Amino acid sequence: MLPILTLEMVYGTVTYYLAHRVEIDEYLKQAKSDFDALRQASRQADPTFYQKMADARRHAQAVRP
């Protein structure tokens, strides 16, 4: 069973975000940038693996009804 958020938790989260919007948005922007850099480094380190994954994805999509 999934835990349920209370209304107070939701309001608290929204309130916190609104009070710290600039910092949170910058944090999320930096996290995306870091992730993109790691993904690119990973692709450069093993391009064959990523090509195989792309081929498998295309094959799986082709066999779906």
Image (cartoon, rainbow, N blue to C red):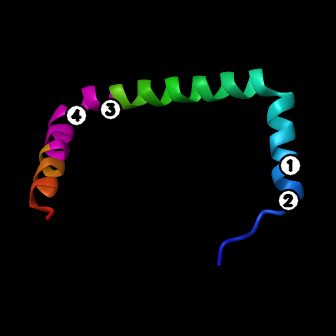
Q: Is residue 1 above or below residue 61?
A: below
Callout 4 crowding tier (Cα within 10 Å): few <14, some 14–19, many ≥20:
few
Magenta range: 41-54
Which numbered disc flags the more N-terminal residue, 3 or 2?
Answer: 2
User: Where residue 42 sits in the image (x, y, percent)?
Assistant: 32, 32
Q: Which residue is tagged 1?
A: 11
Q: Is residue 55 above or below residue 43?
A: below
Q: Nearer the viewer, mark 4 or mark 2?
A: 2
Q: Is residue 54 left or right of residue 3?
A: left
Q: Residue at x 72, y 70 (%)?
A: 3
Q: Which residue is tagged 4?
A: 46
Quadrant containing the C terminus is bottom left
Q: Which residue is tagged 2?
A: 7
Q: Are marks 2 and 1 in contact (CB under 8 Å)?
A: yes
Which numbered disc flags the more N-terminal residue, 3 or 1?
Answer: 1
Q: Residue at x 68, y 25 (%)?
A: 25
